[in-house]
Image (spheres, grey):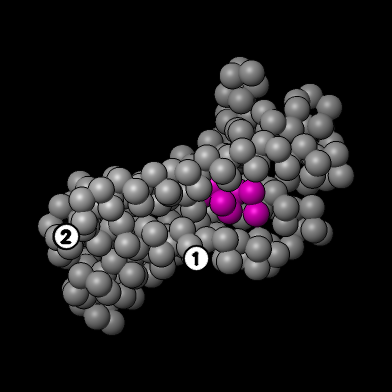
Amino acid sequence: MFQPIITLLKKDLLLELRQQHTFFGILLYVASTIFVLYLAMGQPEESTYNGIFWMIQLFVCVNAVAKSFLQESKGRMLYFFSVTNPVTFIIAKLIYNTIVMLLMVLLSLLLFRILLGNPISHYWKFVGIACLGGISLSLVFTLMAAIAAKAQQNAAIMAILGFPLIIPQLLLLIRLSKSAFGEVFRQGALLQITLLIAGLDVLVIVLSIVLYPFLWKD
């Protein structure tokens, strides 16, 4: 099963290299948004810094993940239907979108540190939480993109379906990342929140594997 997944990952990478305007467009979106924030507010306080970071990651994820399924034509999907199976295909998409989102998160962290300062007390803890959040966001919106791709390629459906699901996850991530700014939690609270987020990630992966074969046959 691993060889087909690797092959599909290579396919997505080659498509990305051939369509570089989409990837660099997202990079430009991230950089320009953070630069405008810098011009508007300079170096914000901790709570504003935390909220802005996750807001940007949310919209970056929508733009980065939406194209993963919406760029696939009907003819290409028919070809994939004949050469692979739905579980392999959705796992490859989940992995690829996770990698892309992690790159965006790391780039955002770098630009935030350069332009908006570093009010974070425990920086590497925040980096870890940010990566965990990026993975969570990419998994949810990959599933939503798969559903939207079957609804006449309508990206708006992905946002409509995804935002109600992502709000609880965002609230948990914002709460969890506050610990990196020096906020004191009760003993075991960080572990409970982390396990809850990890549990949501596992649930999304399982739902993707279970539900996508039904979309695949449509």
Residue at (34, 70) in percent of width and height: 52
Residue 161 sits in quarter? bottom right
The amino acid beneath tag 1 is Ile
Identified by mark 2, the residue type is Val
Left or right side of 100 for 165: right
Label 2: state its secondary structure.
loop
At which x and y percent is residue 183? 17, 62
| Residue on which the image places disc 1 | 167
Check the image and report above or below for 203 versus 48. above
Q: Residues within 10 Å of mark 1 (few under 14, many from 20)?
A: few
- What is the distance, in whole Å, between disc 1 and disc 2 at their CAs? 23 Å
Whether residue 44 is visible, yes or no, is yes
Residue appearing at x 15%, y 52% in the figure: 122
Residue annotated with mark 2: 184
- Is 95 magenta? The answer is no
**SS category of the residue bearing label 1:** helix
Q: Residue at x 60, y 33 (%)?
A: 92
Q: Does the magenta segment cover residue 139?
A: yes
- Sequence-wise first label, 1 or 2: 1
Badge count:
2
Task: Pick whichever, 177 or 190, lies toward us.
Answer: 190
Please give left or right for residue 96 compared with residue 130 in the image: right
Q: Which residues are magenta?
A: 138-144
Residue 104 visible in the current orientation: no
Q: Quadrant of residue 41?
A: bottom left
